Image: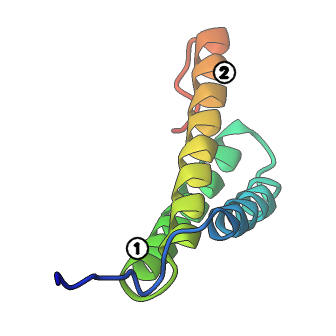
Amino acid sequence: MRPSYREPYPVTGAGVAVGAVTAFAWLLLFGLLGRDVPSYAWWTLFAGGLAWLAAAVLVRHGDRGVATGVAIVTAGGWSIAAAIVAVRWAQSGDWPLW
């Protein structure tokens, strides 16, 4: 017989959903701190960096499903922030983050 190896923390749909909802709320709370496009973008980058740091810790020592949800939603939040910055840049012709 061959040995079978089992994941100590298998990735589940519920774990991914919990991570996604948590990251969404986290990014939303930090995004609401921004008064204009530059402050929104910087708060979103900061919150996303902290979220990815938490996801890295979860991958190593916790639930990888939650880490997956956090990483996916954080990437989506960063993409939205980048699109908003790009639209403002295209409208004004001036880089909005400096």
| Residue type beneath disc 1 | Ala
Return the x and y of residue 1 as percentages of the image width and height: 17, 84
Amino acid beneath label 2: Arg
Could you say where residue 98 lies in the image, as x and y percent from the top left? 51, 38
Label located before the other in sequence (1 or 2):
1
Q: Position of residue 94 (x, y in %)?
A: 55, 19
Residue in the foreground of this view, choosing between 63 and 13: 13
Badge 2 marks a residue whose secondary structure is helix
Name the quadrant containing residue 21: bottom right
Q: Is residue 92 left or right of residue 95?
A: right
Q: Is residue 84 above or below residue 19?
A: above
- The residue that label 1 is drawn on is 56
| Crowding near the residue tagged with mark 1, few <14, some 14–19, many ≥20 C-alpha atoms within 10 Å | some
**In this rendering, would 39 be left or right of 54?**
right
Q: Which mark is residue 88?
A: 2
Q: Residue at x 47, y 82 (%)?
A: 9
Q: How far from the left and from the top, in percent, is residue 57? A: 42, 81
Considering the numbered disc 1 on the image, is that residue within a helix, a strand or a loop? helix
Residue found at the very far front of the displayed protein: 1
Residue depth check, mark 1 versus mark 2: number of the one nearer the observer: 1
Is 17 located above or below residue 73 in the figure? below
Is the residue under label 2 in contact with that under label 1 (CB below 8 Å)?
Answer: no
Q: Is residue 35 above or below residue 56?
A: above
Q: Residues within 10 Å of mark 2 (few under 14, many from 20)?
A: some
Query: In the picture shown, does residue 71 fall above or below 67?
Result: above
Q: How is the image coloured?
A: rainbow
**Between 71 and 44, which is closer to the camera in this rendering?**
71
Q: Give the Cα separation between the discs numbered 1 and 2.
A: 32 Å
Nearer to us in this view, 5 or 96:
5
